[in-house]
């Protein structure tokens, strides 16, 4: 019985963890606003540390500077950085990657 409870608890924990690692779903009009904002607000080239890969759910290194999205009609509280030509949305509270726009 103890083994069954342990396996069940492990399965629940695994499912909950994968739910938190999913990226943010933007409405199509929100994505358009973000893309246009990033094009109009060019930022300097970002240098990522060796071995770092952009992965949803993983924190961004502290050495990478992010920029708030201050676009009219956009109410989410994310920041962004452009890495390798991709716009990466960041949760400012945790610095976790929440969405990658190719």
Image (cartoon, helix red, strand yellow):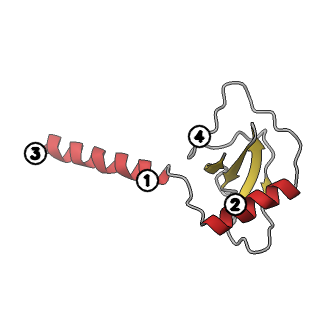
Q: Which one is closest to the eye, mark 4 or mark 3?
A: 4
Q: Secondary structure at mark 3?
A: loop
Earlier in the chain: of badge 2 and badge 3, it is 3
Q: Is residue 56 above or below residue 75?
A: above
Q: Secondary structure at mark 4?
A: loop
Q: Is residue 45 above or below residue 13?
A: above
Earlier in the chain: of badge 2 and badge 4, it is 4
Q: Which residue is mark 1?
A: 19
Image quadrant containing the N terminus: top left
Quarter location, residue 56: top right
In the rendered image, residue 76, in percent from the top left (x then y), is placed at 67, 68
Q: Which residue is mark 2?
A: 78
In the rendered image, residue 93, in percent from the top left (x then y), is placed at 66, 57
For marks 2 and 4, give the CA distance: 16 Å
For marks 2 and 1, give the CA distance: 19 Å
Residue at position x 43%, y 48% from top? 18
For marks 4 and 3, give the CA distance: 38 Å
Image quadrant containing the C terminus: top right
Q: Which residue is mark 4?
A: 55
Residue at position x 54%, y 53% from top? 23
Which residue occupies the extreme top position in the image?
Answer: 50
Q: Which residue is mark 3?
A: 1
Q: 45 or 50: nearer the eye? A: 45
Earlier in the chain: of badge 2 and badge 1, it is 1
Q: Secondary structure at mark 1?
A: helix
In the rendered image, residue 19, in percent from the top left (x then y), is placed at 43, 53
Dot 2 alpha-carbon crowd within 10 angstroms: few under 14, some 14 to 19, many 20 or more: many
For marks 3 and 1, give the CA distance: 27 Å
CB-based contact (under 8 Å), mark 1 and mark 4: no
Earlier in the chain: of badge 4 and badge 3, it is 3
Residue at position x 70%, y 72% from top? 75
């Amino acid at each position: 019985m103890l083994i069954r409870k342990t396996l069940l608890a492990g399965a629940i924990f695994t499912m909950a963890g994968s739910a938190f690692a999913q990226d943010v779903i933007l409405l199509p009009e929100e994505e358009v606003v973000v893309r246009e904002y990033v094009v109009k607000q060019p930022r300097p080239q970002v240098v990522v540390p060796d071995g770092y890969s952009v992965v949803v759910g993983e924190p961004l290194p502290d050495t990478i500077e992010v920029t708030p999205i201050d676009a009219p009609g956009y109410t989410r509280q994310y920041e962004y950085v452009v890495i390798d030509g991709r716009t990466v949305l960041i949760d400012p509270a945790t610095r976790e990657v929440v969405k990658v726009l190719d």
